[in-house]
Image (cartoon, rainbow, N blue to C red):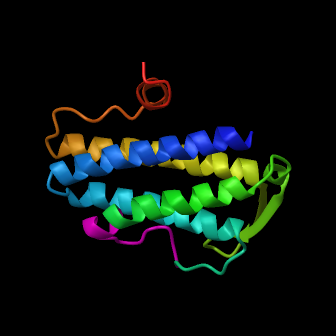
Amino acid sequence: MKAHFIKLFNYNRFANDLILKAIIDRQVPQKALQLFAHLLTAEQVWFDRCHNLPPKYANAWFDYTIEECVQLVPECHDQWIIYLNQLTDADLNKIIKYQNFRGDNWEDSLADILTHVINHGTHTRAQVGQQLKFAGAESLPITDYTYYLRSVVNKI
């Protein structure tokens, strides 16, 4: 199961790289950049929660510049991969206790949190793509998981 999550986080990096390039190519539409910054902030928030670290953000909407996003994509990915490589499959069942931004206490299994991080990234990249289309993009990069598997993992 750990290997599955490593593959998903590598896919997340692949898709983030593609959508970030599309944002840059469109000369940084503001709403697209805000959404992408949200994606990166959420990844960091969940990483910190998994490590029982105090919150760095008051909410999940932090404004990064495009230059900061370019820097943060590999940094976020690397920290997740290092973390995942340190886990055992049994660790994925560990319960993570955290507070949401309203101060409500929650707990979820690590596996469920990891699934959420990947799902949230996919959802938010779709929102970014929609904003890029509104800004005039005629096409968007292919960020489908199966495309990633065929073109990167399996190199068909």
Image quarter in which the C terminus is found:
top left
Magenta stretch: helix, strand or loop mostly: loop
- Out of 77 and 139, give the one closest to the viewer: 77
Image position, residue 94 (x, y; %): 84, 56
Find the magenta span and give its range: 58-69
Residue 38 appears anywhere in the view: no
Residue at left offset 37%, top offset 45%: 127
Residue 118 appears anywhere in the view: yes
- Picture quadrant of residue 139: top left
Image position, residue 23 (x, y; %): 24, 51
Q: In the rendered view, does 17 fall on the left or right side of 149? A: left
Q: Is residue 142 magenta?
A: no
Residue at left offset 41%, top offset 65%: 72
Q: Does residue 14 lie above or below 38 as drawn?
A: above
Q: Is residue 64 magenta?
A: yes
Q: Does residue 35 lie above or below 9 as drawn?
A: below
Image position, residue 142 (x, y; %): 34, 31
Q: In the rendered view, does 23 fall on the left or right side of 14? A: left
Image position, residue 138 (x, y; %): 16, 33
- Picture quadrant of residue 100: bottom right
Residue at left offset 72%, top offset 44%: 2
Q: Does residue 19 lie above or below 29 as drawn?
A: above
Image quarter in which the N terminus is found:
top right
